[in-house]
Structure formats: C-alpha cells, structure tokens
Amino acid sequence: MPKLSIITVNLNNKPGLIETAKSIVAQTWTDYEWIVIDGGSTDGSVDVIKEYAGKIDKLVYWCSEPDDGVYQAMNKGIDIVVGEWLNFMNSGDSFYSKTVLQSVFETENMDADIIYGDTLRIYSFGPFLEKARPIDNSMKKRVPFIHQSSFVKTELMKRCKFDETYRICGDQHFFCDCYDNNKKFIYCPLIIAVYDSKYGISSNNYLLVDYELARINGSEKKITWKIKYRVYCSIKSLIKKMLPKFIVQKLEVSIYMRQCASLKSLFL
C-alpha cells in the first residue's frame, strides 16, 4: 500500500494539467500513487493523461467522463485510492518544490488526521505567500490553509466525503466539520503548494464563495445577513465592473492580510 494517494481533477485545462503533472512526477519521494479524474475534456487533456499513463507506473487510474462539479469528481477519486494519506493537487496547481513530499513524509510528525502547510498563491499581479494560520474558532470564517497544501488520512476522507451541494467551499465545509469533531491538525512549516489564483473556480466566483461560507457558519439564515449580502453583492459587482481585475485582486489580498493581522492579535 502506498503512503500517499494524489488525486488530480481536471476539466479543459491542458496547460495547467501539464504543469501539475510535471510537479508530481518530479518529486524525490516516490511512495505515492496518482489518480486523474477528468470531467470529459475536449481540449487535448486526455492525450496528456494517456501520455503520462504510458510513461509512469505511478498513474494507476484515470477516467474522462462528465460529472456534476469538482466535488463529485473529487469524491470519485476518494472511492478509488488506497494510500494511507490523501492529497488533492488539481490541474493548474503544483507542489512548491520537488522535495515537498520528502520533507513532509520523512518526519516523525504523523500522529495527525490532517497535516497542513503554507501556500504560494499566484495572482495576475504576482505571487503572494499565504502563511497558514493557527487552527481555532475562526475556521468557519476562513480555513487557514487550502486543500492543495494539506494531507488528510484516507480513512477519514472515505468516511466523510465532500458535500456535493457545495460548488466551491466543499473543502472548507469538510475541514470545519473535522475541527468540530476534534480531529487532530498538525502544521508543517513548509510551502506545500503553488495555487493558481488567477483562473481558479473560487477566484472568479467571489459572491458564491461568500454565500457558501455563510452557509457553513449558519449566518445565511439570518435576516440581517441576507440584507447585508444583497447590498454587498451590489457594491462588489459594481466595483468589479469599474476596476481592472488585477486591482480588485490586490485589494482583496490587502483586505485578507489585514484580517489575518486582526485575528492574530486576538490570540497574542
């Protein structure tokens, strides 16, 4: 049984799939299996998958068929994997360096349900290092890491799959549920993943993200939140139409950094 299973979900992102594949096969630590779940791509992605399947034995399974969203595709992969640990490295994202897996899995810090680390986000204006924050009650507002920069015990994921009614924040819902059920998180002080924030699903659906986060923490049922959300949607949509995209992203990163600083001050 391999130590790690890596699942890559892809849909019509051939260039991103190639970059992801390169970062996986370049790893110096090789006790892993690789599964690719393609949503029925028509852009040549399947040819890339076939090429890698013919070259390396680590790609143990792949399929290309329509699905009902990213979390259904991820759940398909969960059904198949046999590794002790599980990581989702979807097309367009990659491991930060070729020694990431070696650094994580050659440590003795494995007494956890979830291991997580830092992320290098790539925006249209340049890179931004997102340091993972401590695990605390603020998780329902924003999980302090992304799933690409985490490793989850496979037995846990097989018991508690992603809720497919979420379109963007199913991973956030999963990690919050783990926190509520006292699962053990361990922080690994490494940059684990490079995340494409230019073209990712959540990067271009800010309002849906806001709604699903409110659904996770329960505030979407409150009348006051519904009113604020409608006003917020109108203002945010107007700003996004008026300003260039890279400026909007810079503003959001600036706001996020201030939020992190405020949260950090609460626990000093």
Image (tube, rainbow, N blue to C red):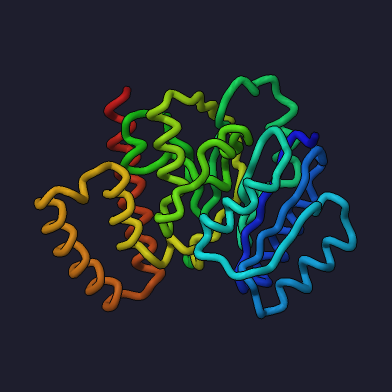
For the image, the number of numbered tags is: 0
Q: Going by the image, does 113 lie left or right of 46? A: left
Question: What residue is rendered at 30% in x and 55% in y?
Answer: 210
Question: What residue is rendered at 34% in x and 49% in y?
Answer: 256
Which x, y percent locates residue 259? 30, 43
Of residues 10 and 196, which is closer to you in this image?
Answer: 10
Question: What residue is rendered at 28% in x and 37% in y?
Answer: 262
Q: Going by the image, does 195 lie left or right of 8? A: left
Q: Going by the image, does 258 lie left or right of 115? A: left
Of residues 12 and 108, which is closer to you in this image?
Answer: 12
Which x, y percent locates residue 140? 33, 39
As drawn, 16 above or below 96: below
Question: What residue is rendered at 56% in x and 28% in y?
Answer: 113
Q: Going by the image, does 171 lie left or right of 151? A: left
Of residues 209 and 93, which is closer to you in this image?
Answer: 209
Residue 48 sits in quarter: bottom right
Residue 174 sits in quarter: top left
Which x, y percent locates residue 231? 14, 64
As drawn, 156 above or below 89: above
Q: Quadrant of the N terminus?
A: top right
Q: Quadrant of the C terminus?
A: top left
Which x, y percent locates residue 43? 67, 79
As drawn, 170 above or below 156: below
